[in-house]
Each structure stands twice: as structure tokens, then as C-alpha cells.
Image: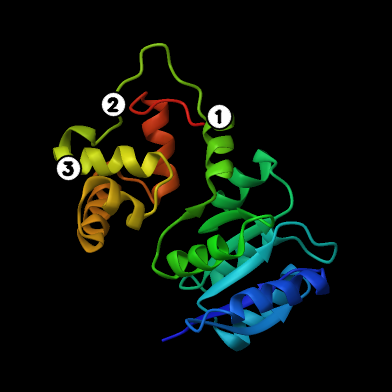
Amino acid sequence: MSVRVLIVDDNALLRAGLRTVLASDPGIQVVGEAASGPEGVHRCDELQPDIVLMDVEMPAGGGISATRELRARHPGIRVLILTMFDVDDYVAEALRAGAAGFLLKTTEPHALLRAVKDCALGETTLSPRVLEQLIDSFVARPEAPAPPRGYDALTERERDVFRSLADGRSNAEIAAHLHLAETTVKTHVAQVLLKLGVRDRVQAAVLAHRAGLVGPMG
């Protein structure tokens, strides 16, 4: 089954470029385009894509408000935010609105294709640069950091996975790093999120950095 993608961006040239990149992968199908947030929400009503590639700033209606509305109306559709700006203010706001990922438009084509597929599999996708900014800007370490609630319930292997995902690694990268099957990693990640009481990998990463369980990124 192909991953069905809707592209939402006010720049027609950029939409064409994204379509070309996505069309190069037989596992991805671009089902439509929109030039504003409100139009994107309307197109989702019609097309029911799996993934929406959403620009963060558009004159006729921005991506963050559209993401919030889209997630309320179609919780099964995942939104991957794209922006030219590596401004950290957008990251937290987009994630609070329910975005499943946040990538810069300068992301390499192969990384974009992987991000779309990871997003379709339920992973929260942040480029390493964006994750680093999120950690640096929104995590203030306490003087005496303490393990997060639920940490004691994690097994040793789950703690290894927890620290690895806090470094921004995908499931495939964690599997290679810890010499595990990717399906096993997926199970461990699900248990980590459940035991820590967090919604996604980003919240887990923030907890890990706040608690001092991993070192500074970079």
C-alpha cells in the first residue's frame, strides 16, 4: 500500500518540487495539493490522505492553526510540518497543535522520503537540527535533576532505547545501535512511552534531557 500524501504550501514552485521528490518513490503517492491551511483541511475532507506535508506560514491561513483543526476533524491523518525557518518558536507550537514531525525545507530528498514513511508508521519525526533547538530552547535542567516519573518501571533495555530516542535516532537507527530487530525496538518504544506517560518521542526526549539522562546534543 502506498503512503498517500497531500502537499499544502502557498509556493507553487515548491509544491512542484516536493511532488517530484515524492513521486520518485514508488511507495508514496501524492493525492493532491493545496495553497493554504484552510484549503488543506478542506482537501483532507475529500481525499483522506495518510500524511499532510504542511507549510508553517501561509498568507491565506497558516499551517499550525490548520494542523490543530485537522487533528480535531481527522485524528488519523498525520501532519508533517515543513518550514524554511529554523526558529524554535514554531516547533513547540506545532507539536502542541498535534503535528507528528517538523522538518526544514532544506532537508535532503532521501531524508524527506524516509521522514514521510516513518511518519506513516507512527513515528514522530524531527530533523536532528530541529530536535537540538527544541532541547536547547525548551529544556532548562534543574540543579538536581531527577529521573522522570515512570523511569523506575523501565527495564534496562527500555532505558537504553529511551536514551537512544532522546538522541533523535529513528527506530532503524536504534536497532542498529543496540543490535536489535526493528520490530523489537518498536515494541520497546511503545512501552517506554506508555510507562513514562508521554504522547510521543519528542516528549520522551524532552524528559530525558531535562532529567540529565543524556548529554547535550551537537
Which mark, residue 136?
Answer: 1
Q: Which mark is residue 147?
A: 2
Which class describes the residues within 10 Å of circle 3: few (<14), some (14-19), or many (20+)? few
For image coordinates 21% across by 50% down, the residue present is 179
| Nearer the camera: disc 2 or disc 3 | 3
- Figure label count: 3
Residue type at mark 2: give it.
Pro
Quarter of the rendering occupied by the N terminus? bottom left
Taking 139 as reference, is 160 left or right? left
Q: Is residue 96 shown above or below 8?
A: above
Q: Is residue 156 left or right of residue 132?
A: left
Q: Quadrant of residue 24?
A: bottom right
Q: Earlier in the sequence, mark 2 or mark 1?
A: 1
In this rendering, the answer to whether 56 lies above or below 163 is below
Residue type at mark 3: give it: Arg
How far separated are the C-alphas under marks 1 and 3? 27 Å
Which numbered marker is on residue 175? none
- Which type of secondary structure does the marked residue at label 3 adopt? helix
Image vertical order of residue 153 relative to residue 145, above or below: below
- Residue 106 screen position, x and y as percent: 68, 55
One can see residue 75 in this view = yes
